[in-house]
Amino acid sequence: MKSRRQFLAAGAPLCLLPQMSFATEDYFMPDEGAPHTRTWMAFGAQRSIWGKRLLPEVQRNLALIANTIADFEPVTMLVRPEEVALARKSVTAAVSLLETTLDDLWIRDTGPTFLINEIGGKAAVDFNFNGWGEKQTHRHDREVAAFIAGAAKVSRVTTDLIMEGGCIEVDGEGTAIITESCVLNENRNPGMSKTAFENFIVPLLGVDKIIWLPGVRGKDITDGHTDFYARFIRPGVVVAGYEPNPKYDDHKITRQQIAMLREATDAHGNELAVEVLTAPDWVRPKYESDDFAAGYIGYYVCNGAVIAQEFGDKEADAKASATLKQLFPDREIVTLNVDGIAAGGGSIHCATQQEPRPISS
């Protein structure tokens, strides 16, 4: 498995292939908790996907998330030209709006994954979004990564890989967590072995070791994104989602993956400390559905804060908030009701994408 991080010379967009010789500059994907330049979002919900009842609630949720994050760092929200007036009424002046075409709101997956190096460089990887394996229309959303790279004025890195930002978690010091169910899937990277995938992703994101989790194919539209199961707090510390109710499918897989993480080591050979965020026993009934994503692990880390969800289960909400405060003692923990977004199977994390601050800043 290749372990060199060097792959990108600053400037024009590149196409990264396994046989390429790498440039000398050392780019890597930083941890989400590293300082941000801004957060990217998309005011992209539309009625044909979300339906008449959910659409206005989801739009309110997006505005609430954007306004909350804007108290801590700049936010740029993509918006369709015909919805600029609606978006402007919904968000504060601290949120910048940028017009473009969109299919949906899930910018964690449609947007680019940003990279930095030690000398102030920045780049953005376009992972060829294909609607989570051709499950949803994506004619416009497949262009979002390139659009953001251009708007951010950074080089766009292209690759043959097809995946989404929710597929991967990194500690910023050489270790990644990835679910097999998502990336080693015929609907994204047909015929690709684990070794072949590693030979792509290791130099691309500047990691040295991948901790593989099985995930679950076909249960949800994402085929089991990593960020629904495990997140890095910092190097050596992981928080894992746990479903305590045996009647739900996630009970077995979350138990299995927590056990796997407790047996894993990072890129430096250190065992992981694994903390657990247990899902709520119940959620508010108004938007509850079969697709409802009731997990506290879908939080977003921004400058100075952790933006997390609450579901109305006071005991479970308080326990999750206390756990996050313990794990992020130097950040404010802000909890939001975004049940509309959860009803669509997503989280605050799914609706946001961080742009890291260059190291030299």
Image (cartoon, rainbow, N blue to C red):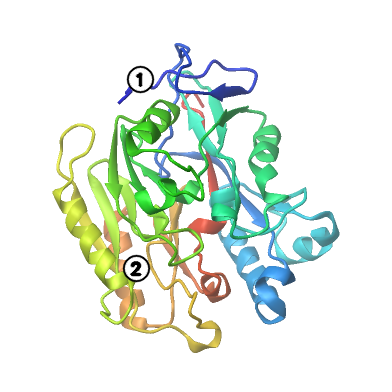
User: Compared with residue 112, is residue 287 higher up or lower down, i.e. above or below?
Assistant: below
Q: Can you see residue 104?
A: yes
Left or right of 331 on screen, residue 222? right
Residue 317 placement (x, y as % from top left): 36, 75
Residue type, numbered disc 2:
Ser
Q: Label 2: which residue?
A: 321
Q: How many labels does the image show?
A: 2
Residue at the spot 65% in from the left edge and 19% down from the top edge: 12
Residue type, numbered disc 1:
Arg
Residue at the spot 30% in from the left edge and 54% down from the top edge: 214
Q: Quadrant of the N terminus?
A: top left
Q: Can you see residue 302?
A: no
Residue 53 placement (x, y as % from top left): 68, 82
Q: Nearer the viewer, residue 323 or 274?
A: 274
Q: Nearer the viewer, residue 157 or 35?
A: 157
User: Compared with residue 148, is residue 52 higher up or lower down, i.e. above or below?
Assistant: below
Left or right of 164 on screen, residue 129? right
Label 1 packing within 10 angstroms: few (<14), some (14-19), many (20+): some
Label 2 packing within 10 angstroms: few (<14), some (14-19), many (20+): many
Q: Which of marks 2 and 1 is nearer the N terminus?
A: 1
Please give the label number shown on residue 48: none
Left or right of 344 on screen, residue 299? left
Q: Label 1: which residue?
A: 4
